[in-house]
Amino acid sequence: MGLRSRLGRARDAWSSHLATVRASEVVDEHIWQELGDALILADVGVATADELLDEVRQRVGREGVDDVDGVLEILKSVLVDRLGGADRSLALGGSPSVWLFVGVNGVGKTTTIGKLGGREAAAGRHLVFAAGDTFRAAAADQLAMWADRAGAPVVRGAEGADPSSVIFDAVEHAAARGADLVLADTAGRVHTKSNLMDELAKVRRVAEKGSGTVTETLLVIDATTGQNGLIQARQFAEVAAVTGIVLTKLDGSARGGIVVAVQEDLGIPVKLVGVGEGADDLVEFDPVDFVDALFAVDMTA
Ligand SMILES: Nc1nc2c(ncn2[C@@H]2O[C@H](COP(=O)(O)OP(=O)(O)OP(=O)(O)O)[C@@H](O)[C@H]2O)c(=O)[nH]1
Ligand SMILES: [Mg+2]
């Protein structure tokens, strides 16, 4: 399943600019302006758009490229270089390993855990779900439904219980049964920064009190919230040792450039991409595939 057909409207915002660029016969100042506008409209962010274009212009000059297709090819390769090179694997190695999911509310943490749990269980992984979002009882019910589907146990606490105690119990439960992996949900309500820092530090400390090791802390970001979502995400990245980004809802009204913005801004690799609400709607992020999808001409918006 290619990313291209799953990207939703990720290309909308910039494809009309791209069409104007493609229709031009010469590489003139107007083309550079259109490309700059296109990147900004695609949610790449103003500073990053400028940087990208500077890099493209330099290469265009150096390589003596004088046609529009050549310029676009260079832009693609600059984007792939920027996005590429990161290790996107999800680390194991604890007994059990704990993958912690953090992020503001509504971004898709619980859904992502559900999808990933299904995938890991299908791959033969022995896992336990930890309902560390004790803020609402419904949150644990939602996770329990996904756990059920994956055929894996869920450890939950009473509403209002300390999230770290639930995650601790889940780690113990996993260790006692020889499970490899604990997928730990957390509440996404907005805290003050120092609250957030204390709570995430505690969750992590307690998760590692017994035999567990936190091998991934995945920050989930809703791609449709664009540059605003990025500001909130930055707070999490500042207080938690985030090892990867999950960018959700790329099937919706998100603009594709947000992927570039997130990775540039936070300096953390996008590891997974959510492209729908269903169990199969989670894909590994592949820079080449993604950039190809953004530039594809055969897909109408
Ligand atoms: N279209 C689309 N919807 C998604 C995706 N991921 C999650 N959602 C939906 O987004 C909504 C919120 O998802 P949750 O998983 O509950 O988000 P959360 O981060 O756990 O939210 P809180 O528990 O309130 O902090 C749900 O309706 C999901 O079905 C995605 O990749 N694409
Ligand atoms: Mg949730």
Image: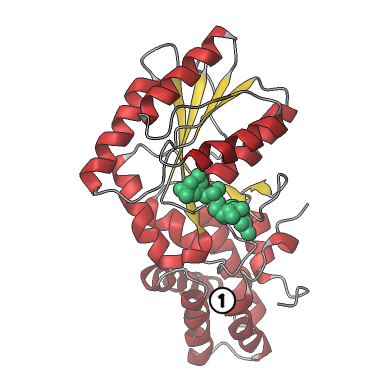
Q: How is the image coloured?
A: secondary structure
Q: Kindly tell me whether residue 166 is visible in this rendering.
A: yes
Could you tell me which residue is drawn at 30 percent across and 28 percent down? 202
Q: Quadrant of residue 164?
A: top left
Q: Nearer the viewer, residue 223 or 26?
A: 223
Rendered position, 291 above or below 241: below
Rendered position, 33 above or below 187: below
Q: Is residue 137 left or right of residue 121?
A: left
Amino acid beneath label 1:
Gly
Could you tell me which residue is drawn at 44 percent across and 11 percent down? 211
Q: Nearer the viewer, residue 147 or 27?
A: 147
Which residue is at the far top? 176
Q: Is residue 71 left or right of residue 219?
A: right
* Residue bearing the label numbered 1: 64
Residue 205 x/y as whole percent: 32, 23
Residue 149 x/y as whole percent: 71, 34
Residue 136 x/y as whole percent: 45, 42
